[in-house]
Image (cartoon, grey):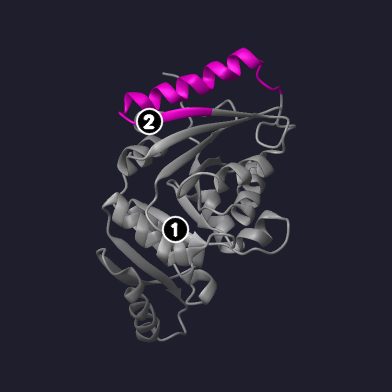
Amino acid sequence: MTFDEVLVPLDLSATADRALPVARSLAGRLDLPLDLVTVSSPFEDESVAHRLLAHRLEATRGVAASCTVLRGEVVQAITQRATEAAAVLCLSTHGRGVLGRTVLGSVAVEVLGVSDGPVVLVGPNVDVSRFGEVRSLLVVTDGSLQLLPHGPIAWLAQRLGVAVRVVAVHELGGVLAPGTLLDETTFLDHVDELCGSFRAMGLSATPMVVRDQHATTALTSITGSCPSPLLVVVSGRAGRPDRHHVVAALARDASAPVVAVPRVVVHAG
């Protein structure tokens, strides 16, 4: 699994524009071109939208960048473009409310539910004016993460080439891992195995296990103590809205961008 560009959906508002510094930094670090896109209605003059996008190219200096005006239903147009371009999506989120749709915005939460690749969420607590080069990855596991050699998390870690911290929150009370919790030994073995997988890629990897804390609170606190991090979590797909709420809470509270990666399902045979 590889990705060929960083795609930034914009609605030409100041809130959406907050994603631009983060997208620019990621594109530079990943050595990928950047594409700014907006979706125009059939009744709008496409040239106006293209001109407004072009003004935003000033914020992407230093990386190869282009702008594209799409037509059609917003979520479908964005996800189709992302699939065709094999893109990492990067978009800003809102900071209001407690429900996933309110916090993320209706477009963001729908994109998150259908995207086949990583979705980078730039929340309201990310200081985009000071966002620089990514220097660490915090990879969150609930005891079920499969770090496949060709999966999106492995790709992201290898391309960034930064230090990795595998963060596990034990006794989650159904926040990240609904159902039966893993026993202590199995859980620690899982964390060590993940660290070993990252080390096999030539990366520095250390484990961190947090106990008896609410997952969102613990992860937000850890994020604030690491150098220029990205917080990587597995998002839900159809039928798993519980994970969207966790992602939404982290995007709302964390001081670092949250990378939501779709769960990879491994079929027997």
* Residue furthest to the top: 185
On residue 11, the disc is: none
**Which is more N-terminal, label 2 or label 1?**
1
Q: Secondary structure at mark 1?
A: strand
The image position of residue 244, as x and y in percent, is 62, 47
Q: Residue at x 47, y 51 (%)?
A: 119
Quarter of the rendering containing residue 48: bottom left
> On the rendered image, what quadrant is the C terminus found in?
top left
Q: Residue at x 53, y 20 (%)?
A: 190
Q: Nearer the viewer, residue 227 or 147?
A: 227
The image position of residue 207, as x and y in percent, is 51, 27
Q: Which residue is mark 1?
A: 90
Q: Nearer the viewer, residue 206 or 231?
A: 206
Query: Visible in this render: residue 147?
Result: no
Q: Which residue is mark 2?
A: 204
Q: Secondary structure at mark 2?
A: loop
Q: Which residues are magenta?
A: 180-207
Q: What secondary structure is the stretch in magenta mostly built from?
A: helix
The image position of residue 46, as x and y in percent, is 38, 82
Residue 148 sits above or below residue 175 on the image? above
Quarter of the rendering containing residue 81: bottom left
> On the rendered image, what quadrant is the N terminus found in?
top left
Query: Visible in this render: residue 8?
Result: yes
Q: Magenta stretch containing residue 205, yes or no?
A: yes
Marks 1 and 2 close (CB-CB < 8 Å) = no
Badge 2 local density, few (<14 within 10 Å), some, or many (20+)? some
